[in-house]
Image (tube, helix red, strand yellow):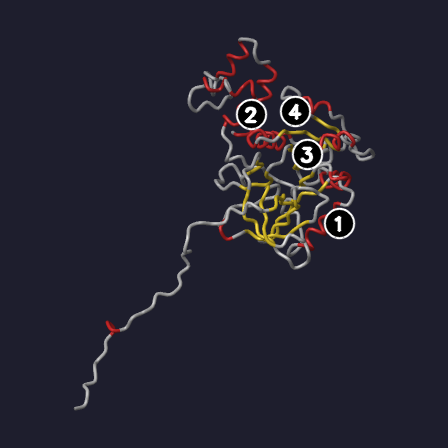
């Protein structure tokens, strides 16, 4: 008797589950042996890093590890690297860890833009470069950079260039009460005083185009052009003025982070409390201010606690006036 042929339908078909993208375990290596490094340049998905953060160590090009996702990595970040750390051409390491940032210099496109752009991480100083003439100094940008420095935890330094063309004293006097260090340079003399302030530290330079920032960088780092070219050759593409780059000072005595010239410095990410909070003697006082106080004093903020410090002789009137002039930059 001939066997009956069975009719099959879709219920008889067994589909073997494929290998999905979900990992078999949530455990991830802690990369305890990752090498420490400092990011010195960023170029289209590639990060150039100095091993140990030292200028005399090889530079390594790295990509961001998948487990970091979209974690931002910027110039100045301290990172952990694994993989090929030889720095040889066509080699690539992986950034597996970004250390907690001690300081952050950030800005927004304007005062209404909610998107923050981190310019430099872990810089100890912000050198605000302003020309005394050609172009004339603009206190507005200086005030905004001071706000960004105070809010980000950086120590501000005001560098006034081209003092051979104008007297620096009137402009510098505006910031005397804030106790901001002021250094003066001129085109016919080396910036000895500025070099001494930068030695052994990570410092970011910011300023309008044309104020002499590039001239300062080329004087402080004699092989700056060659260093930029070397970093660009290691990465993909060439370095442009649209990105920051860290350059080693001679003999490895610190780093200078050259930033592109800025036309505006948005402060949408800063609150009025961030500025007085940067000063040890004012941070506790503003806790007595009413909610929403802008610390500008009467008539806008008639109950600002900073005025009571002046009345008790604990704060110089000139220092409060200088602080409030900077606070106006937030308005």
Q: Nearer the viewer, mark 4 or mark 1?
A: 1
Label 1: how many residues lie within 10 Å, few (<14), some (14-19) or many (20+)?
A: few
What residue did someone put label 3 on? 201
Which residue carries the number 4 mark?
A: 180
Q: Are marks 4 and 1 in contact (CB under 8 Å)?
A: no
Which residue sits at x=69%, y=51%? 231
60 over 300 or under it: above or below: below
Q: Earlier in the sequence, mark 4 or mark 3?
A: 4
Q: Does 313 appear above or below 299?
A: above
Q: Distance of mark 3 from mark 2, alpha carbons?
A: 20 Å
Disc 4 to disc 3, C-alpha distance: 17 Å
Locate residue 34, reporting x and y percent: 58, 47
Is 150 left, or right, of 51 in this rendering? Answer: left
* Mark drawn on residue 226: 1
Q: Position of residue 285 (x, y in %)?
A: 50, 17
Report which residue position mark 2 lands on: 278
Q: Are marks 1 and 2 in contact (CB under 8 Å)?
A: no
In the rendered structure, which disc, 4 or 1, sits on the residue that comes first in sequence?
4
Q: Disc 3 or disc 1, which is closer to the eye?
A: 3
| Mark 1 → mark 2, Cα distance in angstroms | 38 Å
- In the image, 111 versus 194, the foreground residue is 194
The residue depicted at 61 percent of the width and 44 percent of the height is 36
Q: Judging from the image, what secondary structure is the residue with disc 2 in? A: helix
* Residue 186 horizontal side relative to residue 113, left or right: right
């Amino acid at each position: 008797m001939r066997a009956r042929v069975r009719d099959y339908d879709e219920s008889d078909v067994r589909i073997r589950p494929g290998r999905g993208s979900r990992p078999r375990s949530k455990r991830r290596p802690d990369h305890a042996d990752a090498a420490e490094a400092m990011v010195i340049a960023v170029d289209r998905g590639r990060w150039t890093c100095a091993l140990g953060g030292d200028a005399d160590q090889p530079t390594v090009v790295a990509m961001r590890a998948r487990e970091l996702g979209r974690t931002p990595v910027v110039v100045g970040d301290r990172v952990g690297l694994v993989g090929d750390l030889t720095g040889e051409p066509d080699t690539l390491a992986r950034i597996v860890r970004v250390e907690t940032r001690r300081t952050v210099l950030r800005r927004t496109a304007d005062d209404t833009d909610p998107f923050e752009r981190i310019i430099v991480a872990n810089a100890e100083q912000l050198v605000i470069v302003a020309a005394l003439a050609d172009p004339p100094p603009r206190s507005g940008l200086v005030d905004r950079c001071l706000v960004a420095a105070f809010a980000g935890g950086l120590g501000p330094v005001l560098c006034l260039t081209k003092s051979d063309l104008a007297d620096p004293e009137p402009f510098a006097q505006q910031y005397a009460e804030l106790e901001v260090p002021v250094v003066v340079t001129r085109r016919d003399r080396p910036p000895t005083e500025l070099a001494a302030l930068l030695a052994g530290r990570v410092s970011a330079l910011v300023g309008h185009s044309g104020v002499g920032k590039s001239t300062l960088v080329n004087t402080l780092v004699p092989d700056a052009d060659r260093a930029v070219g070397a970093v660009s050759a290691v990465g993909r593409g060439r370095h442009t003025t649209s990105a920051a780059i860290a350059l080693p000072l001679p003999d490895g005595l610190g780093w200078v982070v050259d930033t592109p010239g800025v036309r505006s410095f948005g402060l949408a990410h800063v609150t009025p409390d961030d500025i007085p909070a940067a000063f040890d003697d004012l941070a506790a006082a503003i806790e007595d201010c009413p909610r929403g106080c802008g610390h500008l004093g009467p008539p806008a903020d008639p109950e600002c606690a900073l005025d009571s410090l002046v009345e008790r002789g604990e704060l110089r009137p000139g220092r409060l006036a200088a602080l409030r002039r900077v606070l106006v930059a937030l308005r």
